[in-house]
Structure formats: C-alpha cells, structure tokens
Amino acid sequence: MPELPEVETTRSGIAPFAVGHVIEQVIVREPRLRWPVPSQLAIEARGQRILSLSRRAKYLLFGLVNGTIILHLGMSGSLRVLSAPTAVLAHDHVDIVLDSGVTLRFNDPRRFGSLLWTHDDPLQHPLLRSLAPEPLSEEFDGAYLAKAAKGRKVAIKQLIMNSQVVVGVGNIYASEALFRAGIRPRRAAGRLKTVEFDTLVKSIKQVLREAIRQGGTTLRDYVNPQGMPGYFRQKLFVYERGGEPCRVCKTPIRQLVQGQRSTYFCQECQH
Ligand SMILES: [Zn+2]
C-alpha cells in the first residue's frame, strides 16, 4: 500500500508536469472506485488550469481555479506521467490529459483508490476535515504524543498508526521508527517516559524524511512516477526482516502479529 512517503514522492514527481498546465480533458474509463467518480468532475475540470498540487495525509489535491480534484491512491493505485500516446492497460481507470501533451494516468487494480471533486475548501471536505496532524508538522511533537497516549493501555505501535492521532504513519514506518527509538512495539502507550515520546516523534520524522528523499519504499504494487523503484527498502532495519540478523546487534529480528498486522522488532535493541 502506498504510504505517506510514496504519496509525497508521487506529488513531487508529478508536480512539475502538472502545475501551470491546463486540463484538456479527463477520461474516466471506470468510475467504480472506492466511491463513484462524480460525473461532474470531468465536466468541471475541463479547460481549467492546475494552480497547485498539494498533499494532506495520503490525499493529493489538484487545485484548479474553480475547485479541487481530490485523489487517493488507495491500496494499489499509482499515477503515471505519460509524455507520448501509450496503450491503455488493464486497470488504467482515469486519464487527466494536459495541454502540454502529457497524460496523468491513474491505475488501480483493487479500486480502493478514489477521485473526487469539490468546489469548496478541500481541507473542509468530509474525508479531510477531521484528519489528525501531519507527522512532519510542528504540531506533532513529543508533548502532543504524550497527551494522546495519557492513561492509555493500547500498544504504542497501534497508537502511532492510529490516523486519529497522527496521519500517514503506516506499518513500515511505525516499525522502523520504533526500532530507531529503541522502543518495543507492544509497550502500553501510556507507560512511555517523556523522553521516549520525544525520541519516538523524532524517529518518525527522520524515517519519513529519509523515505521521501529516497523515493518511498516500493511495495509489490507501487511504482513511483518515473517507474523507478524506491530505494528506502534497502535501508530497512526490521520491517519484513523476521529471522534475519539485526543490523546493529546481529540478534535475529522477531516477528509477531499485532492488530492483524505483522510487527518486527529486535529484543536486544528495543526495550
Ligand atoms: Zn538489535
């Protein structure tokens, strides 16, 4: 599943091809995504210039003069930049054709992605307005996380993956951040020390920033805009390394299931 760094990589990879260009047409081949693509979208977007391409959580926001296209990649979606006519493949559901000759093509085999339209402030859209803070924002700091954890028995890993606490920290980055912070994923959130909240928040930001710099991690079904794999995977300390030696102390990485997701940690490096 594309996580926040993959979505940010998509945003920064696509922005130079999109921003400033006029949408000639939007071709919707398959409107049955997670929510139906509104028929209004193609009509409204036609002839409009893309003024901005921003991101909130894992939503990409194409800011047009008259409204905003809200795009979510879902579990398996990708957005490719095509500079020449290219045969339509299976699951190529939507094309955004630009006046430059470039087409932004949305492919999504599992159709959990979405493409929506709003005339209003996109941050007030029902899907976006109650989202928790961005992990890379100043608002997300040790004190904020400590407050969210106060008195709670939930595992710290579950807490940082809870999108009502902070958005965009998925399984990979939660596992890696906890390793770097030296904190075991199953510890009760409310029992962490003040300094551990600070360290953990710093680790989350560091891990996300590194992943963004390296173009995301690239899971099975994710390809970044240039079709190149992300390089972050080579730097993972624990994620999907069950049984392999810890890169720091050589102890085999432990794997367990936590909240229906695999969790990985080193019992020597994490306490
Ligand atoms: Zn270790």
Image (cartoon, rainbow, N blue to C red):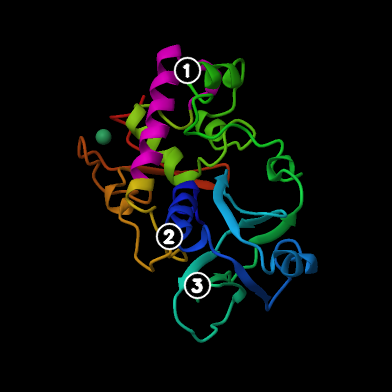
Residue type at the position of mark 2? Leu
Residue type at the position of mark 3? Ser
Mark 3 CB lies closer than 8 A to ligand 1: no
Q: Is residue 240 or residue 142 the one in the foreground?
A: 142
Of the 4 image quadrants, the one containing the C terminus is top left
Residue type at the position of mark 1? Leu
Q: Is mark 3 on a helix, strand or loop?
A: loop
**Separation of disc 1 and disc 2 at Cα?**
31 Å
Q: Is residue 138 left or right of residue 61?
A: left
* Residue 9 shows in this picture: yes
Sequence-earlier tag: 2 or 3? 3
The image shows residue 74, relative to residue 191, as above or below, that is: below
Residue 152 shown in magenta: no
**Separation of disc 1 and disc 3 at Cα?**
53 Å
Q: Is residue 215 left or right of residue 124?
A: left
Please say if the residues under marks 2 and 3 sit with CB atoms less than 8 Å apart. Answer: no
Residue carrying label 2: 219
What kind of secondary structure does the magenta stretch mostly adopt? helix
Sequence-earlier tag: 1 or 3? 3
Residue displayed at 28% across by 30% down: 268
Residue carrying label 1: 192
Horizontal and vertical percent for residue 225? 43, 64
The image shows residue 170, relative to residue 95, as above or below, that is: above
Q: Which numbered circle lies on residue 100? A: 3
Residue displayed at 63% across by 61% down: 113
